[in-house]
Image (cartoon, helix red, strand yellow):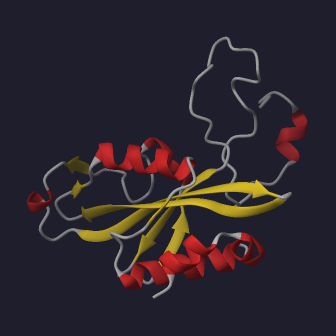
């Protein structure tokens, strides 16, 4: 993206799912070759306590509103009063020219804002993002309420993408 291009300043920010606009490898095989292309993945937070889901692009770099000013620990027991969140990696792809939710993988996260501590497994988050990018549906760990919130969010975001999505996703989020 050319940051100095004045045309970019005129464009409105999209609340959609697209993150980056250009393939860093662009077929040249030089710098950036072999890197993960995050063009079509977005982090969706599911908050079962509040009954809502929202996109926070900061989660790509562990800088979401939920994660800011929180020290994350690998031991869940050290955050006994943490509020549950699910960070769900949602990947969009196209088949027959139609966009659909191709990969959906949820990761558990708890946050206690009073003590500014939280629990998450960084390797799990990275692996689940990778699985989502590869088109896997991994929501078995999520509770039914969270699955329902996620399903409603995805339907409301773009009903046609939901309709175009595979039977596996519909069955996995059916509660």
Percent coordinates x, y for residue 22 in the rendering: 75, 34
Q: Which part of the image, by quadrant, shows the C terminus?
A: bottom left
Residue farthest along the front direction in this orientation: 167
Residue 168: image quadrant is bottom right
Counting from the top left corner in percent of width and height, residue 98 is at: 82, 62
Left of 113 or right of it: where is 145?
Answer: right
Task: Pick out the residue farthest to the top.
Answer: 30
Farthest-out residue, left: 77
* Residue 76 vs residue 7, the one in the foreground: 76
Vertical arrangement, residue 49 with respect to residue 13, above or below:
below
Lateral position of residue 99 relative to residue 19, left or right:
right
Q: Nearer the viewer, residue 65 or 133?
A: 133
Task: Quadrant for residue 99, please give it.
Answer: bottom right
Could you tell me which quadrant the N terminus lies in?
top right
- Residue at position x 62%, y 19% from top? 32
- Residue at image location 27% in from the left, 53% down from the top: 120
Q: Is residue 78 above or below residue 49?
A: above
Q: Residue furthest right?
A: 7
Spot occupied by residue 31 in the image (x, y as percentages of width and height): 63, 13
Which residue occupies the foreground of this view, 136 or 48? 136
- Please state which of residues 167 and 65 is positioned toward the viewer in this rendering: 167
Residue depicted at x 48% and y 84% = 148
Q: Quadrant of residue 80?
A: bottom left
Q: x and y percent of residue 2 in the render?
A: 80, 28
In the displayed structure, would residue 136 be above or below residue 53?
A: above
């Amino acid at each position: 993206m050319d940051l100095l291009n004045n045309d970019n300043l005129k464009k409105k920010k999209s609340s959609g799912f697209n993150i980056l606009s250009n393939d860093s490898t662009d077929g040249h095989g030089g710098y950036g070759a072999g890197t993960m292309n995050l063009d079509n993945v977005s982090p969706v937070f599911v908050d079962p306590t509040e009954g809502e889901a929202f996109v926070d692009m900061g989660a790509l770099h562990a800088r979401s509103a939920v994660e800011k000013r929180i020290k994350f620990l690998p031991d869940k027991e050290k955050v006994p009063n943490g509020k549950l969140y699910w960070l769900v990696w949602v990947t969009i792809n196209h088949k027959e020219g139609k966009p659909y939710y191709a990969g959906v993988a949820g990761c558990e996260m708890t946050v206690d804002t009073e003590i500014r501590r939280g629990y998450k497994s960084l390797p799990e988050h990275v692996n689940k993002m990778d699985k989502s990018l590869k088109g896997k549906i991994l929501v078995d760990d999520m509770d039914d309420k969270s699955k329902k919130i996620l399903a409603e969010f995805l339907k409301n975001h773009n009903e046609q993408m939901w309709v175009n999505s595979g039977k596996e996703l519909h069955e996995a989020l059916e509660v």
